[in-house]
Amino acid sequence: MIDIKTLEYKRASFALAVGSFLIFCNLYLFQPMLPLMADEFSASATQVNWLLAAGTLALAVMLVPWAVSSEVVGRRRIMLVSLFLLPVIGMLMLFAEGLLMLSLTRAAMGAALAGFAAVAVAYMAEEFTSRALMLAVGSYISANSLGGIAGRLVGGFLSDHWGWHVAVVAMSIFSLAGAILVCWLLPKQKNFKPRKGQLNVHLISVIEHLRIPVLRYAMLIGGVNFALFVNLYSVMGFRLVAEPYSVPVSWASMIFLCYLSGTVTARLSGQWSLKHSPVTGMILGTTISLLGMWVAAADSIAAMLAGLMLISSGSFFSHSLAYAWVSQKAVRAKATATALYLVHYYVGGSLGGFYLIACWQYAAWSGVLVGGSVLYGLIYFLCFILSKEKAAAEITATTA
């Protein structure tokens, strides 16, 4: 087993962080470009949102198939296949004619990204000691957020100055270099044992998890939370580049630095759960995020940035608590439960874009306030039901 303070640990943890960074760089590369792409293809904001939604939807759909495949061929092989597909699909985007073909290649990119995302933590769980695992997962999650920020900044700056083709080429070259580095650094698996016939096991586990109310409602909370979080940023991008602000896309992409406030609150959520109810924490995070949406309504860029920081802080806080809740409450097949949470998470992010962008097109930020408030209300309702189901489950456990 790989333990901390060893050369093998340093190589493995760094390789996994690099892979995680690449995954989220590629996933969110196009988000800041959406206003530019709407002009490029003479498309509406809702239509061009497919460039983001196609990738996240395909990622969500492919998480479980990649995880099942890794049970047969191994985690490391799946991760490397996933990473080396990124530059290939990236270069194929350059030949896409029209928004439809580009959206389809983005879907292919999302499917490829799912391979690494689905099995990286499973690799760590099998190869690392318990002490090393906790540290490695922390680095891996940090690389998630940093990769998302970097991908958006690169996409915004390069596309604004030299066009989206240059941004895609640069990301493809970077992805190829990163994939080679991961291949060189990541140790071969020593504790993996192939297991065939896992598809039925996973399907049964998925059905069982969805039948458990305390898991089902937490997954829905995660999905609606991400629908708001990621797409309020997309709408803000459209708002800033439009009149009367007319901010260049390269500068508008800087709003994604507000994500960093969520990195802090995600860590604080662990301390909260030790002393207070996670459901109460989800309500608190939702309230902070809701406040941020309303603060961002002011006609001031400073207020918009402050609002986005509040949205990030609250959303990451709620997400961390809901994610940990699912892992904790799943009695068996915890890996399948957390994968199912991520399916809800990314599907919510994909579908929420069409909803909030439609609100923006219909009534600008006022429409977003109304439409967003409906989704926040849904989260409050789900938290209320989740608290009732938790209490009922505890009574049942006590009397059993």
Image (cartoon, rainbow, N blue to C red):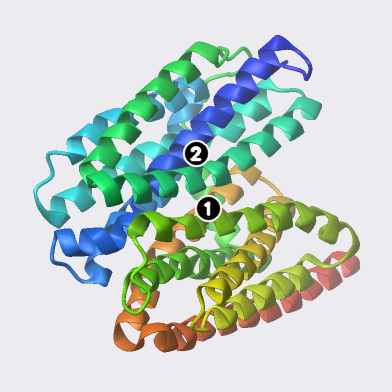
Disc 2 element: helix
The structure residue drawn at horizontal position 16% and vertical position 58%, both measured from the top left corner, is 40
In the rendering, which numbered label is found on residue 342?
1
The structure residue drawn at horizontal position 66% and vertical position 20%, both measured from the top left corner, is 127
Mark 2 vs 1: CB contact within 8 A:
yes
Residue 64 seen from this side: no
What is the quadrant of the C terminus in the image? bottom right
Amino acid type, label 2 = Ala
Amino acid type, label 1 = Leu
Give the camera-side residue of 90 and 257: 257
Residue 139, quarter of picture: top right
Q: CA distance from mark 2 to mark 1?
A: 10 Å
What is the quadrant of the N terminus in the image? top right
Residue 87 placed where, x, y %?
30, 29
Residue 72 placed where, x, y %?
46, 24
Give the camera-side residue of 363 and 133: 363
11 to 256, vertically: above or below: above
- Could you tell whether 149 is left or right of 252 in the image? right
In the rendering, which numbered label is found on residue 117?
2
Label 1 neighbour load within 10 Å: few <14, some 14-19, many 20+: many
Label 2 neighbour load within 10 Å: few <14, some 14-19, many 20+: many
